[in-house]
Image (tube, grey):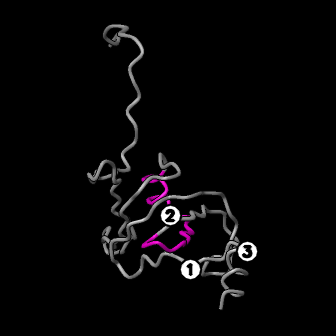
Amino acid sequence: MEIIKSFLKDHDIFPKVDFSDKKVHTVKILNVKREKFTDRNNKEVEGMKFLVEEDGEMKTILTTSSALLLKLRDSEEGDFYKIQMKHVKVGATPVRTYDVWKIKDDKEVSVSEEIPVIEEEEDIGDPPF
């Protein structure tokens, strides 16, 4: 019913992107904001809420995942991404991570979570030891 759809839209209630299906999700970033929410353990946490478009439908991505946020840190409104959640083993522990590709000019570019390299300011010679 249109009245229900209108209510949901007016209150920014949209379906969530379900990364647990382990499929590749192609999304367009529409907006992002900080948000407090209750996690699975009923603990209040702060994360990021992305409003995205997937297959013509408005959806949300609600996350506290540093792995995902590091890869989306340079995203801007209107950017397209393909995102897939994966589990990798670190020792005996499964860890959730994300493969992320930015789509630009019909090309997919993998987004890494590497720490940015700090430019050297000036050559001050060899250390005194």
- Calculate the distance from the C-alpha at mark 2 to the C-alpha at mark 1: 19 Å
Q: Residue at x 33, y 56 (%)?
A: 101
What secondary structure is marked by label 1?
loop
Q: Looking at numbered disc 3 in the image, what kind of residue is underneath it? A: His
Q: Which residues are magenta?
A: 54-72
Question: Callout 3: 10 Å neighbours few (<14), some, many (20+)?
Answer: few
Q: Earlier in the sequence, mark 2 or mark 1?
A: 1
Which residue matches tag 1?
15
Tag count in the figure?
3
Q: Looking at numbered disc 1 in the image, what kind of residue is underneath it? A: Pro
> Comparing marks 2 and 1, which lies closer to the viewer?
1
Residue 111: percent from the left, percent from the top? Answer: 34, 51
Compared with residue 37, is residue 76 higher up or lower down, i.e. above or below?
above
Magenta span contains residue 69:
yes
- The mark found on residue 65 in the picture is 2
Residue 11: percent from the left, percent from the top? Answer: 73, 74
- The mark found on residue 11 in the picture is 3
Decide which of 36, 31 is in the foreground and name it. Answer: 31
What secondary structure is marked by label 2?
loop
Compared with residue 108, is residue 82 higher up or lower down, i.e. above or below?
below
